[in-house]
Image (cartoon, rainbow, N blue to C red):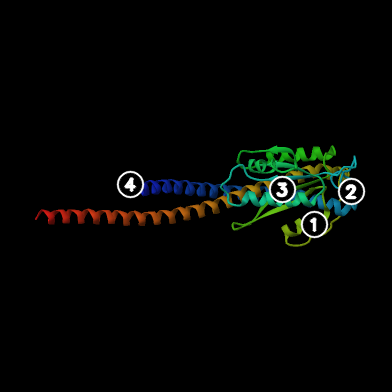
């Protein structure tokens, strides 16, 4: 009886865990759909800004802008790396892969400085020798344009003050529901070849270098669009990381649910066998006692 009681307790605990994993799977599914829809709605706006900036750079030849050339005022070259992780775990290898990608980038660049988005990243990089300049946390909420603006304004201000000379962002790009790849991307200073590559990938063909007239001047228009473009990159990175996190959590919870169901089926089989053996033993004892009395 004690063995049966233990099995029942384990079955009850696994059943409760199974309910939690299924609920988390459903929640992540809803958040994933909402995040993808939100990203698709805002992508055309930032894509239009990107096209205009490319047209300015390609048409004007050389644009004298602080966003294009690297800064090196005091002779010390520093590289800022924005690492986007999640605020919660239970997402499989999602956070571990991002942190590994960020560590590899830190080894390649000169004097890396970390700017972290997400509690998991803070816990990981606080144990590394790299300097953490700033932490951002949005409490696992859906990223908004205001969140991206907060980070982008901070990066631009520090870049203009000469705190660092380059800015990279490390996040997880969701190619498909089963293909989540950590990605490193340089966002400052701006690179014409990289912009052309992004536009070619988005439009399916190479963008033609068009000639436009910009008023009051190409430099002023470019300087007005550059912060919006950087904000768009940050927003896209945040949302991509968010939907990748939800996809990874869906996969992790699905695997956990399958494991719980397998364990529950095995325990039920053992429970039925033990219960049947107990019933057989009781019947044998009753028959034996009745025969002894006769």
Give the residue number, with chain letter if any, for mark 1. 196
Of badges 4 and 2, nearer the viewer stands 4
CA–CA distance in space, label 3 to label 2: 23 Å
Q: Is residue 136 left or right of residue 261?
A: right
Q: Which mark is drawn over residue 2?
A: 4
**Residue drawn at x 48%, y 53% as measured from the top left:** 257
The mark nearer the N terminus, 3 or 2, is 3
Q: Quadrant of residue 231?
A: top right
The mark nearer the N terminus, 4 or 2, is 4
Say which of 269 and 133 sits in front: 269
The mark nearer the N terminus, 3 or 1, is 3
CA–CA distance in space, label 3 to label 1: 17 Å
Give the residue number, with chain letter if any, for mark 2. 63
The mark nearer the N terminus, 4 or 1, is 4
Q: How many numbered discs, if any?
A: 4
Q: Is residue 81 left or right of residue 283?
A: right
Badges 4 and 1: C-beta atoms under 8 Å apart? no
CA–CA distance in space, label 3 to label 4: 66 Å
Mark 1 Cα shell of 10 Å, populated few (<14), some (14-19), many (≥20): many
Q: Which mark is drawn over residue 107?
A: none
The mark nearer the N terminus, 3 or 4, is 4
Q: The residue tagged with tag 2: helix, strand or loop?
A: loop
Give the residue number, with chain letter if any, for mark 3. 45
Q: Residue furthest front?
A: 292
Q: The residue tagged with tag 3: helix, strand or loop?
A: helix
CA–CA distance in space, label 4 to label 2: 81 Å
Of badges 3 and 1, nearer the viewer stands 1
CA–CA distance in space, label 1 to label 2: 16 Å
């Amino acid at each position: 009886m004690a063995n049966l009681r233990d099995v029942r307790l384990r079955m009850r605990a696994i059943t409760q865990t199974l309910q939690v994993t299924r609920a988390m799977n459903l929640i992540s599914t809803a958040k994933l759909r909402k995040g993808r829809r939100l990203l698709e709605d805002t992508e055309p706006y930032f894509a239009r800004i990107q096209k205009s900036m490319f047209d300015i750079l390609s048409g004007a030849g050389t644009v004298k802008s602080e966003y294009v050339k690297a800064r090196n005022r005091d002779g010390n070259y520093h590289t800022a790396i924005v690492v986007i992780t999640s605020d919660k775990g239970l997402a499989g290898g999602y956070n571990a892969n991002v942190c590994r990608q960020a560590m590899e980038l830190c080894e390649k660049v000169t004097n890396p400085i970390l700017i972290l988005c997400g509690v998991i990243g803070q816990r990981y990089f606080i144990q590394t020798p790299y300097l953490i300049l700033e932490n951002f946390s949005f409490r696992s909420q859906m990223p908004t344009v205001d969140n991206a603006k907060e980070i982008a304004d901070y990066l631009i201000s520090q870049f203009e003050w000469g705190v660092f000379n380059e800015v990279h962002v490390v996040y997880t790009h969701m190619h498909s529901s089963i293909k989540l790849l950590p990605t490193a991307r340089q966002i400052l200073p701006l690179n014409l070849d990289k912009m052309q590559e992004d536009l070619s990938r988005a439009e399916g063909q190479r963008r033609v270098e068009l000639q436009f007239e910009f008023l009051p001047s190409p430099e002023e228009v470019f300087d007005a669009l550059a912060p919006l473009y950087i904000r768009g990159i940050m927003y896209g990175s945040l949302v991509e990381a968010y939907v990748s996190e939800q996809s990874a959590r869906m996969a992790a919870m699905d695997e956990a649910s399958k494991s719980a169901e397998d364990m529950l089926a095995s325990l039920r089989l053992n429970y039925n066998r033990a219960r049947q053996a107990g019933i057989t033993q009781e019947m044998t004892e009753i028959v034996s006692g009745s025969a002894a009395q006769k």
